[in-house]
Image (cartoon, helix red, strand yellow):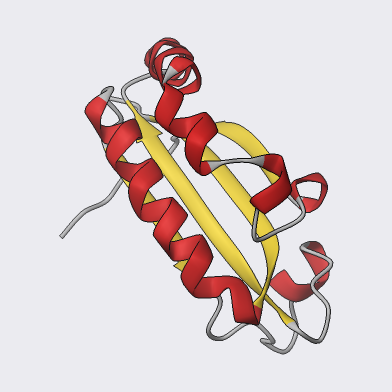
Amino acid sequence: MSHYVDGFVLPLPKDKVEKYREIAEKASKVWLEYGALEYRECVGDDLNIQGVVSFNKIADAGEADTVIFAYIVYNSKEHRDEVNAKVMADPRMSEMCSPDDMPFDCSKMAMGGFKTIVYGKA
């Protein structure tokens, strides 16, 4: 089966990582409750690798920022659309994602949907 993945990259102030983690932990429960297969939020650790474009650059992260790389896995694009419609209608999301209290600038977040072309698992 070819899964569908929503991917996200965003700059996050280093002093906001814990607040972001708390929100992401709650959000993961909502996505999984509505049928997402997997939900991952990852914080940058080794971002300045020589010879390639750094995540800091593509995320336009400043000196005081790190980078969040996140993804959510679904059965298909249609499944993603169904899950996301339910998630966005859930009042818990608006409670935890108040625009006035977000730990990052939403306008700097990159996101997109991706078709899986290779899947491997140990």
Where is residue 33? Give x, y as percent: 23, 29
Q: Quadrant of the C terminus?
A: bottom left
Query: Residue at 45% of width from left, 36% of height from top?
Result: 117
Vertical placement of 102 versus 79: above or below?
A: below
Vertical placement of 26 versus 74: above or below?
A: below
Q: Is residue 50 left or right of residue 89?
A: right
Q: Count how many numbered circles sit on residues in the image.
A: 0
Where is residue 55? Give x, y as percent: 70, 70
Along the viewing direction, whichever of 103 and 57 lies nearer the viewer: 103
Query: Residue at 31% of width from left, 22% of height from top?
Result: 75
Q: Quadrant of the N terminus?
A: top left
Question: Which quadrant of the structure image shows residue 16?
Answer: bottom right
Q: Is residue 84 left or right of residue 60?
A: left
Vertical placement of 39 versus 66: above or below?
A: above
Where is residue 31? Give x, y as percent: 34, 32
Along the viewing direction, whichever of 90 and 108 lies nearer the viewer: 90
Query: Residue at 32% of width from left, 33% of height from top?
Result: 30
Question: Which quadrant of the structure image shows residue 82?
Answer: top left
Whether residue 101 is visible here, answered yes or no, is yes
Whether residue 43 is visible here, answered yes or no, is no
Q: Is residue 33 left or right of residue 2?
A: left
Vertical placement of 111 versus 34: above or below?
A: below
Where is residue 65? Give x, y as percent: 72, 78
